[in-house]
Amino acid sequence: MSCGNSGRSDDEDQRQTYYAISNYTAVEDSQLSLSEGDVVDVLEKVNETWWWAEVEGETGYVPTNHLSETCPSEGVDRWQDVEYFSSYNTLKLHLEMLSDKPRTLAYRTAFETARAFIQGKVVLDLGCGTGILSVFSACLGDSRKVYAVEASDICEQAERVISHNSLSEKVSVIQTKAEDLELPEKVDLIVSEWMGTMLLFELMIESVLVARDKWLKPDGVMWPSEACLYLAPCSAHSVYNEKVMFWNDVYGFDFSPLIPVTQAEILGHPLHNHVLPEDDCLSPPATVARLLLKTATLEDIEKITSSFKFKITKDGK
């Protein structure tokens, strides 16, 4: 891997130079394939997901999550840590997570129903963020001690929350990575909200497993205890009508020649932040991966292979 030189001239000041942090294979003609370390001159930041860019004289769309302003060869581990943890430094992302009521209420219910187990026990909240799971543990579970561990600077806000709720004697906020964590004792429960897009994106689970192997008692418990990744064929019919079929009648005029263009633009990219109605699933889901957090290993998540089949039960339109 080599980062090379962008070779930009003075009249190209409008461009911004980024670097490819991982390989990407284009899935349509309007996209560019990337190799780790490629110099990418961004010409237009079209949206949060795709930018129009030039690589070695070729122009096309590139995915933003494969780019960084820092060359990956200049300290890969350092770049990954800074880039990852800095994304959690502000409240914006934490507000989004806490606003996910099914997620947050599931954890709250767990602490409420398992109070008899948690009472008087020691809990490790890994990746505590603003501290909601630590508060649940101390108040609803009546744990004896909670170690709230957070690598990003948001831990300063967690400390403020803990202090404001008069929980400082029970909850200790520690700013460190899981791999560098040192505790005075083993813990009875490790709780973490590590799940990402497609379950494993961000790979925070690696840190959870490291902490488990070092700090969980032999009879300790992991929350969540099990995690599954499901796959199902689906039809986003309402989105298709809204984005594609729209061109059939634009204020009374036929703009249908634009349908192939919008199909290429929309169908070639993932649909982000779309809440999929259950009725849009064309068959029952298949289990692609199942992890038991008490026994899962790093090798289990490095490569996941699965065989599955679907019986389509409705028309995909």
Image: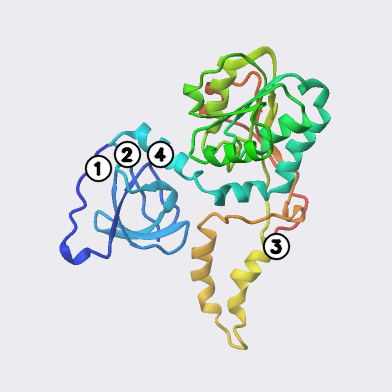
Q: Which residue is identified by label 2?
A: 72
Task: Decide which of tag 4 and tag 3 comes sooner along the chain.
Answer: 4
Tell me which amino acid carries mark 2. Answer: Pro
Query: Which secondary structure, mark 1?
Result: loop
Q: Nearer the viewer, mark 4 or mark 3?
A: 4
> Of all residues shown, which one is farthest toward the top?
218
Give the residue pinned by disc 4.
82
Examine the image and state in which quarter residue 188 appears: top right
Residue 44 located left or right of residue 299: left
Residue at (37, 32) in percent of width and height: 77
- Residue 57 horizontal side relative to residue 81, left or right: left
Horizontal and vertical percent position of residue 228: 67, 34
User: Label 2 vs label 1: CA separation?
Assistant: 8 Å
- The residue that label 3 is drawn on is 317
Q: Are marks 2 and 1 in contact (CB under 8 Å)?
A: yes
What is the three-letter code of the residue carrying label 3?
Lys
Nearer the observer: mark 2 or 3; the answer is 2
Q: Single out the mark in the foreground, 1 or 3.
A: 1
